[in-house]
Amino acid sequence: MACKRGALIVLEGVDKAGKTTQCKKLVQALELSGRPAEMMRFPDRTTTIGQLISAYLEKKSDLEDHTVHLLFSANRWELVPLIKKKLEQGTTLVVDRYAFSGVAFTSAKPGFCLDWCKNPDVGLPKPDLVMFLQLSPSEAALRGQFGEERYETSTFQKRVQQRFEELMKDTTVNWKVIDASQSVENVHTNIQDHSLNAINKAQETPLGTLWK
Ligand code: FDM
C-alpha cells in the first residue's frame, strides 16, 4: 500500500510575529512524535532565482515591482517538484511564508490589485492549513526595531496586514488565526493542535490546487 501523504502546512504573518521560531518548534515536535517533517521557507534564497530576490531584499539591487513579484512566484514554482515528492513520501512540510506573503507584500505597493498578484501562483500545491500569526503593530514594535531589509517599516507592514485580512476572507483556504501575543509555548501548543488535525485529514484527502 502506498504510504499516506504528508501535509502542507504554512505559517504566515507580519514581521516579528515569530513565524520562524514557531516553524522550527513545530518541525521538532512532529519529528519527536514520530511524524516525518521538514521545514521550508520562501523566499528560498539558495537558488539562482532566490539569489536575485535576496539581493533585492538587501537593497543591493533594484528590480521593477512586477518583475520581482514574478520572481517570488517563480521561486515557489521551481520548488513544486520537491514539495510534491516530499509530501508523497509522507513528509509533512512546514513552510515559513508562501503565496499569501507574495500577494500581501506586492499588493501593499501602489497600483497593484489582489487579483493580478494572485495570478502567477494559481495552481500551486494548496496548503492543507495556513496559520496566520496575528500581532498588532504596537505589540510588534515592543519586540524590537525592524531590520534593514526592504519592506521592514511600520507603515508598509500595516498595509501588508490589511492585505492579509483581505486574503483571509477566502473560505476556500483553511485559514486559522493564531494570537501571536501569547507566550512562545502557548502559541506552539495552539499551532501543534491545528497541525495534528491537518495531518490526519491530509492522509485521507488528495493534495489540492491553490486558487483554482
Ligand atoms: N516576500 C516574501 C515577498 O515580498 N513576496 C513573497 O512572495 C515572499 C515569500 O520578502 F519582507 C517578502 C516578505 C519579507 C521578505 O523576508 C522575506 P524573510 O525574513 O526571509 O521571511
Image (spheres, rainbow, N blue to C red):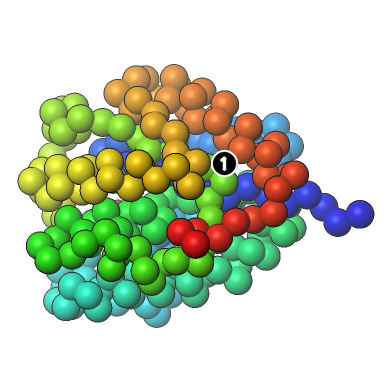
| Residue 26 in the figure: left or right of residue 157 | right
Whether residue 23 can be seen here: no
Measured as percent of width and height from the top left, residue 122 is found at 44, 66
Amino acid identity at mark 1: Val
Q: Count neighbours of disc 1 (C-alpha within 10 A) and say few if under 14, some if 14 to 19, many if 20 or more.
A: many
Residue at 16%, 33% (x, y): give it: 137
Front-most of residues 197 and 31: 197
Is residue 164 visible in the rendered structure shown here? yes
Q: Is residue 30 above or below residue 207?
A: above
Answer with the quarter of the image where residue 83 lies.
bottom right
Ligand 1 is located in which of the four quadrants?
bottom left
Residue 69, quarter of picture: bottom left
Q: In this image, 191 relative to 6: left or right?
A: left
State whether residue 178 is above or below residue 198: above
Which of the 4 quarters of the picture holds residue 166? top left
**Residue under numbered circle 1:** 27
Q: Residue at x 73, y 44 (%)?
A: 203
Residue 82 in percent (x, y) is at 60, 67
At a point 17% along the width and 55% down the height, the residue shown is 108
The x, y position of residue 183, in whole percent, is 37, 20
Quadrant for the N terminus in the image: bottom right
User: What residue appears at the point 66 percent right and 60 percent down from the top-left corner?
Assistant: 86
Q: Is residue 14 left or right of residue 6?
A: left
Query: Along the line of sight, which residue is nearer the eye, 180 or 198?
Result: 198
